Amino acid sequence: MEPTARTISALLADTTTSPAELADAVAWCYDDEALPLLLPLIRHHDARVRRAVAQALPSVLGEAAPDDTVRALLVLSNDPDDDVRDWACFALGTQLSEVDAPVLRDALVVRLDDPHDDTRCEALLGLARRRDERILPVLQERLARDNVFSLEIDAAGALGHPSLHTLVRGHLSGWDDDVVARVCAALRLTDPDGVGDDLLDGLAEWFAGGAPHASDDDRYWWTVTLQLLEHAEYRAPEIAEQVHARLAGEARATSLMLGSRLAQLAGDHGWWRWSPTY
């Protein structure tokens, strides 16, 4: 059973509760009502508890305004413990990527020189998701190295600057299977010529074939598209418009496309053709 606000409250009230026990409960808590109980724990003496708080805060935010949570995570992003900073930067950079403010960006910029690799990379990706141009020279320098981290490749894709395309191309090999698709996505997202006619044609054919009811074999281009949009959702209008143009005159396929997740994401980013009535 997942820990609840009542569970956390009882552990905090019990003087025999160990930091390890409290940390385990906090880390796996998804109860929105626990938020006010977790916020004060950013000052807990044990790093395991602070790390758990950084891990849990996005999960218990619910419908609450993010201000207090962001402020707490900003404190944790400067924690002396590596894992705490890592989780805080992941929360700020990726899990709360829809939240944007100068103070948040500036805190992530500070972490670009963090001695901890994962923390540094999470900060980089968080800024890339917000398309903060300050990271462009940082990415150019890091991708010019022989060895790079996969999160740095993800950041290049999220930023999508054409100057990174050749640098990403230099790192296409040597990855585990689960990373290959992300690297290929970054290559498309940084391509100065766009995401690729093969992708756009494939998507159009998928919708023409009855998507989302087409056979699994035809889902390939949809899967590739989702990989692109995972880190660069703002590219959805561009993709949607070009697929829509390829479906001109095909009423059924166009209707499927306009009612798809792609069209909805494009609408969230200002695509004028999308309507919630679809």
Image: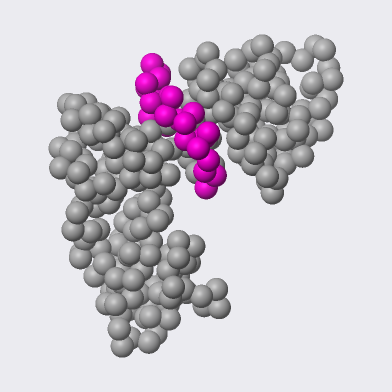
Pinpoint residue 182: horizontal percent, then vertical percent. 31, 44
Query: Along the line of sight, which residue is nearer the eye, 4 or 135?
Result: 135
Pinpoint residue 267: horizontal percent, then vertical percent. 47, 67
- How many labels, in total? 0
Q: Is residue 26 left or right of residue 159?
A: right
Query: Along the line of sight, which residue is nearer the eye, 127 or 7?
Result: 127
Query: Does 165 appear above or below 278?
Result: above
Residue under the image location 26 percent in, 43 percent down: 183
Place residue 5 in its image quadrant: top right
Place residue 214 in its image quadrant: bottom left
Q: Is residue 216 left or right of residue 167?
A: right
> Does residue 4 appear in the picture of this structure?
no
Query: Does 60 appear above or below 16?
Result: below
The reply to whether the magenta stretch includes residue 123 is: no
Pinpoint residue 116: horizontal percent, then vertical percent. 40, 18
Q: Which region shows up in magenta?
A: 98-122
> Does residue 137 appear in the picture of this structure?
yes
Query: Does 225 appear above or below 90?
Result: below
Place residue 176 in its image quadrant: top left
How was the colour assigned to the protein in this rendering?
A: one colour
Q: Residue furthest front?
A: 102
Query: Along the line of sight, which residue is nearer the eye, 28 or 231?
Result: 231
Q: Is residue 190 left or right of residue 1?
A: left
Quadrant location, the N terminus: top right
Q: Magenta: predominant secondary structure element?
A: helix
Pinpoint residue 72: horizontal percent, then vertical percent. 63, 29
Residue under the image location 20 percent in, 64 percent down: 198
Residue under the image location 19 percent in, 54 percent down: 192
The reply to whether the magenta stretch includes residue 115 is: yes
Residue under the image location 33 percent in, 86 percent down: 250
